[in-house]
Amino acid sequence: MQIALKERDFMKTNLGRSNMNTINIRRHPDSGYDAWLAFAGIDKDGTIYSHTLPESIYTFGRDPLLDTARDELKCALKLLTGKMPKVVDSPAKSGSILLEILAGPVRTDSFVPEEEWNKLGSEGYIIKYCNTASGKNLLITAKTGAGVLYGVYALLRLVQCGTLTQDIYLLENPVTGLRMLNHWDNLDGKIERGYAGSSIFFEDNKFIMDLSRIRDYARLMASIGLNAVVMNNVNVHKTETNLITSAFLPKVAKVAEIFRKYGIKTFLSINYCSTMEIGKLDTADPLDEGVKSWWANKAKEIFETIPDFGGFLVKADSEFRPGPFTYGRNHAEGANMLAAALEPFGGLVIWRCFVYNCTQDWRDRVTDRANAAYDNFMPLDGLFADNVLLQIKSGPMDFQVREPVSPLLGGLKKTNFVLEFQITQEYTGQQRHLCYLAPLWKDVFDFDTYRDGAGSTIASLLSGAAASGRLSGITAVANIGNDMNWTGHDLAQANFYCYGRLAWNPGLSSEEIAKEWVIQTFGCNPHLLDTITGMLLESHHIYESYTSPLGIGWMVNPNQHYGPNVDGYEYSAWGTYHRADHEGLGVDRTVAAGTGYAGRYNKPVSELYENPKTCPEELLLFFHRVLYKQKLKSGKTLIQHIYDSHFEGTGKAEQLVIKWSGMKDLLPPQTFERVLNRLAEQAKHSKEWCDVVNSYFYRKSGIPDNKGRQIY
């Protein structure tokens, strides 16, 4: 079975590390529906790279996920080569692709020695060639069906990216055990912070009738190594509270069955006051025996309906959601009550740490929203049950285009945690602007917390917890909806893809993930590959340049969070201030004279942030108040940096349109037009950002642009 790629070996051998891919029923080749699972086939010209795969598939072991892996491999290879591989009862003489669940390295015919087998985790896999009497076989082996499935997707990615070689040896395990997506979908079909249509789960306060799209979504998730999903909004309203009742549980079970076939566990967001809203109790006090009993019975009912149910995601005592504070209890007491109910069934409680005073007086310069998660949860370190994970946003505020890493991530030592990202672009252009988030997330993974000394990066804390047997995980707010192309903006699919790849392996670079995605989505034409990859890699910097400067954040229209409004939240109760006046702007978060937030980090990070001379400049205004005339490291004054950055960002946004336009003949027509329209809107809107922000600070400071450009 001949596999060929066009014109050059696009990716170096270190690109072929980790995950998976699969096949989709084609709805329309130009719709974007197939995403990176299109398996569009072999280019017909310019081929210099080729590799021959065995033409049959042999499976060893019994597991539903092994069947899924076999079927995915069959269909993908049929699309790639035009020839359906045979499924055989024994390895063919010419060799086979062997899919094997290996319970232990004890069989005499095993190709995996004990030292290799011992390195495999429950979801890891090995890909390698092995010689047998029947020929040279390509082996994908794992301890579980899930591992084989991930190995199949990894093989397909290697094939498409041109990195499968005759001496391939790939042993991979995910960095952490829980790799999740959080959906903010409501039963009426609307999605909070959804920018790609309506829910794929719900409509008109019920589950959708046709579940086929959920299956296709499960395939996309599994193909990038994700293994858990929360299908409903963390803000659980009255109707959604009933998802854990008999009125909806059978429907939840049907969806869970679809996800199960792809190794994905189903979780639900719950209303902390369910005992009162649907249980007819008069309290939700976590120490009340009636409350404990109610949740224990509810957990039993859920697990009888969905035996592999994952557990609960809880937003409590945050943004007007109910919680244990009402009863004088703390977060640990609230979470542990639920954990006790779920523990007999292996269920988890994921407790969000997005807790802060959302009724702050803007005149109050002592209270600091950035401190809230740390101050609420650090005193409780070590008090949470073993099956509780604290879900901590990557930054202390709220998914801004630039903010420091949450100090809580490097503070907790005795508590399980989940790192939370946001794929849906609430503050980064809402999938109307191109903003590839991998570089931002890489900064988080690579951040050294110094929790256990130098080298205590977020990635190492996650992997270290997993290696020691403790629970840990990564989650993100999903960016998909029922738009045909899933994400509204075709290029926003790259954020979905890169999230899964980084959740599996944070060591991958933003560039190699971008190239993988481009090749699998659009093909391997060199000009197309280089151009789209370049657009992705520069897009976060472009967006940051024409929006909020140097880590100050916000400056958006209230509620919708789209578009420039410098004072939109400046006098609000949400604690999101920039403190600009005629002399300067920025928030003093030092220990010496400010809110003390800089001191929440371990040394030497706290010392770095405390001093404006050593504070990373991209975060300068987050930590310090700076005068407009003060010079930055570039030699520019702060005000000139603001002017230059915004004009530069607008110019580069306009260049994105030109770059995309130059690939018209290389892309499907409808795809080309959809993206072109989004990029044109971005260019136009970037100018609005530029003019509003520059005019605001010109009027505040009275200092003109030294380059004489028009500011209003």
Image (cartoon, rainbow, N blue to C red):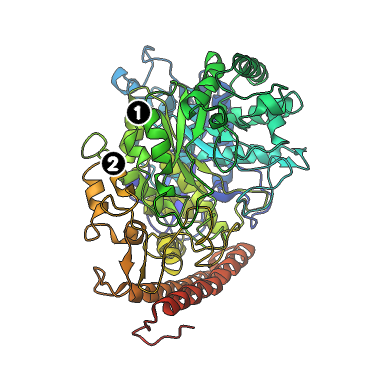
Q: Residue at x 42, y 54 (%)?
A: 515
Q: Quadrant of residue 602?
A: top left
Foreground pick, 92 / 239: 239
- Which amino acid type is shown beneath numbered disc 2? Thr
Q: Is residue 583 visible?
A: yes
Q: Residue at x 60, y 27 (%)?
A: 260
Left or right: 584, with 21 as reference point: left
Q: Residues within 10 Å of mark 2 (few under 14, many from 20)?
A: many
Position of 155 relative to 190 (above/below): above
Please name the residue that numbered disc 1 is placed on: 465
Is 426 on the left or on the right of 124, as rendered? right
Quadrant of the rendered structure where residue 675 is?
bottom right
Looking at the picture, tell me which residue is in the foreground, 200 or 352: 352
Question: Which comes sooner in the sequence, label 1 or label 2?
Answer: 2
Q: CA distance from mark 1 to mark 2?
A: 15 Å
Residue type, mark 1 in image: Ala
Residue matched to label 2: 449
Instruction: Residue 12 in the image: state x and y as whole percent.
Output: 33, 50
Horizontal side of 647 relative to 607 (left or right) equals: right
Q: Is residue 678 above or below residue 520?
A: below
What's the mark number on residue 132?
none
Decide which of 111, 245 is in the foreground and name it.
245
How many residues crowd mark 1 within 10 Å: few (<14), some (14–19), many (20+)?
some
Whether residue 172 is visible to the viewer of this picture, yes or no, is no
The residue lying at 70 percent from left, 38 percent from top is: 212
Residue 279 versus residue 583 in the image, above or below: above
Instruction: Give percent across and percent down for residue 411.
Output: 32, 36
Q: Are marks 1 and 2 in contact (CB under 8 Å)?
A: no
Image location of residue 455, percent across then percent down? 23, 39
**Which picture quadrant has residue 65?**
top right
